[in-house]
Amino acid sequence: MIHRRHLAIVLLAGVVAACGSPLENATAGFMEQVRLGDPAAQGTYADNRELLESAEALPIWMDALANADSPQVRRWAASLLGNIGDPSALPGLTDAMSESRDVREAAIDAIGRFDAVDAANAFAAAIETGSREAQGPALAALARMGADAGSAVASVAAAAAGDEALIANTAVSTLADIGNDEATAALAGLAADTMMEMARRQNALQALQRVDSDAARAALAEVEATVADEEGADALRDVL
């Protein structure tokens, strides 16, 4: 089996070399090695890194991320797009967060190498349009970014008010980790919303208490005044 794999790689390299550019030769040979699980792929990557991570390789890896049959190739494509760092790759990386775990993790890591605002917006897009499997990791990534994820607050707040309880509770916690004034206001709004289930409101109030800022303290005072006489809000008043 090993001999057949190496023979296939050699034959492919010979065919490509006869008609392709150095970039086409390098990418085609590398992808075939990755697809076959050939350990020589690491050496090929090291020897051709400048070509594989060049701006000219961008459309090749974007196409591979979207269309390659091999999850291993898509995982490598995501990683290489992160190394290239062109923002035009972000929509494809966001879509890849809804794929298998290995591809998703590579896409998250790649997005994290971009400018904070671009990365936060990409994770926000995954929350808005991605699969459930993508939403949780996107929220976790934004939580790790903290205040740098400020541009994603609106998307996180919408998830915190959504119908999916696990995602909503994760989003509530993420708002506290972001902790800017907009996130604080969103938490206060959830805590005071009488149309929201009490457990979610309580969770939002506890998250708001984790934020150490003047805005958060002012918001807590407002929530306390709002629920002081609210019928059936004992669970909230106990937290306060």
Image (tube, rainbow, N blue to C red):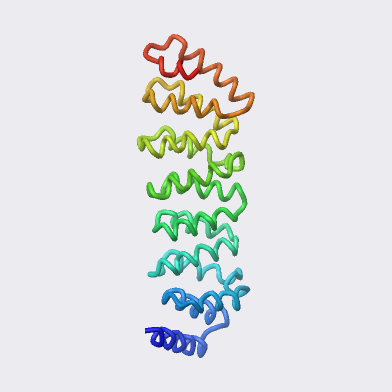
Residue at (40%, 69%) from the top-left corner? 70
| 32 or 119: nearer the viewer | 32
Task: Place residue 233 in its image quadrant.
Answer: top left
- In the image, residue 154 sits, relative to residue 6, either above or below, namely above
Image quadrant of residue 81? bottom right
Q: How many marks?
A: 0
Q: How far across and down, in percent of the image, does residue 69 sit?
A: 38, 69
Percent coordinates x, y for residue 21 in the rendering:
56, 83
Residue at the spot 50% in from the left edge and 71% down from the top edge: 60
The x and y percentages for residue 113 are 59, 56
What residue is drawn where x is 60% and y is 78%?
Answer: 47
User: At which x and y percent is residue 22?
Assistant: 57, 82
State left or right for residue 38 relative to residue 45: left
Quadrant the N terminus occupies: bottom left
- Relative to 8, is 138 above or below? above
Residue in the picture at 45% in, 28% down: 203
Of all residues, the one furthest to the top in this rendering is 229
In the rendered image, the vertical position of residue 182 relative to residue 8, given as above or below: above
Residue 206 or residue 53, whichever sits in front: 206
Q: Nearer the viewer, residue 72 or 182?
A: 72
